[in-house]
Image (tube, rainbow, N blue to C red):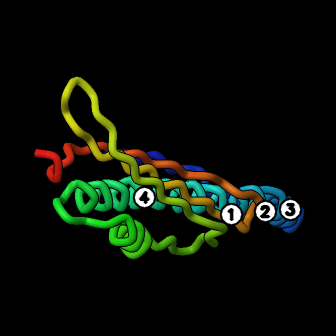
Amino acid sequence: MPYIRLPRHRSIQASERGSQVVGFALVAPLLVTLALMMMQIVGIVICKVSLVAATKQATHLAALKGSTNNQVLSAAQNYWKPSGLGSCGQSTVTKRTRSAGVSFVVVRVQQCLEIPLVDRKVNLTSTARELDEGKL
């Protein structure tokens, strides 16, 4: 059975090795910057998701009979703690509204985050509403 001889791979010459190093040196900083930016964006998304969960938890507590605004404020602050990003302030507002004869509790939590990579501040806001059990 006849066989076909494949041509041998030629070895990489020294000048080609140097061009590969230069190409990598040009592309590597871009890849590292992209990776760091993606990690910052993922961190912001995780903070937003946990802020929404903290707001829902605080709203549920505010809707209970006999709860105080201080309890709601401490629940929102204790449930949500930013990790990896600096905090530059938080505000929690609780109000009771009435719509079509039904009482609601509305909690709005606003959090400011410092993003170290781009030296910027981002405001995250979450609002939740629940039936006021104290008025039932």
Corner quadrant of residue 54: bottom left
Would residue 40 appear left or right of 55 to someone viewing this image?
right
* On-image quarter of the C terminus: top left
Is residue 13 shown to the viewer in this render? no
Mark nearest the camera among 1 and 3 is 1
Q: Are marks 2 and 1 in contact (CB under 8 Å)?
A: yes
In percent of the image, x 26 and y 41: which residue is there? 104
| Residue 28 x %, y % | 75, 62
Q: Are marks 3 and 2 in contact (CB under 8 Å)?
A: no
Measure how far apart labels 2 and 4 are at the Cα level. Answer: 22 Å
Q: Earlier in the sequence, mark 4 or mark 1?
A: 4
In percent of the image, x 72 and y 60: which residue is there? 33
The residue carrying mark 3 is 22
Q: Nearer the viewer, residue 4 or 98?
A: 98
* Amino acid carrying mark 3 in the image: Val
Q: Residue furthest top?
A: 100
Local SS, label 2: loop
Q: Are marks 4 and 3 in contact (CB under 8 Å)?
A: no
The residue carrying mark 4 is 51
The residue carrying mark 2 is 119
| Residue 90 x %, y % | 56, 64
Measure how far apart labels 4 and 3 are at the Cα level. Answer: 45 Å
The residue carrying mark 1 is 115
Mark nearest the camera among 4 and 1 is 4
* Amino acid carrying mark 2 in the image: Asp
| Residue 55 x %, y % | 36, 56
Q: Residues within 10 Å of mark 1 (few under 14, many from 20)?
A: some
Measure how far apart labels 1 and 3 are at the Cα level. Answer: 32 Å
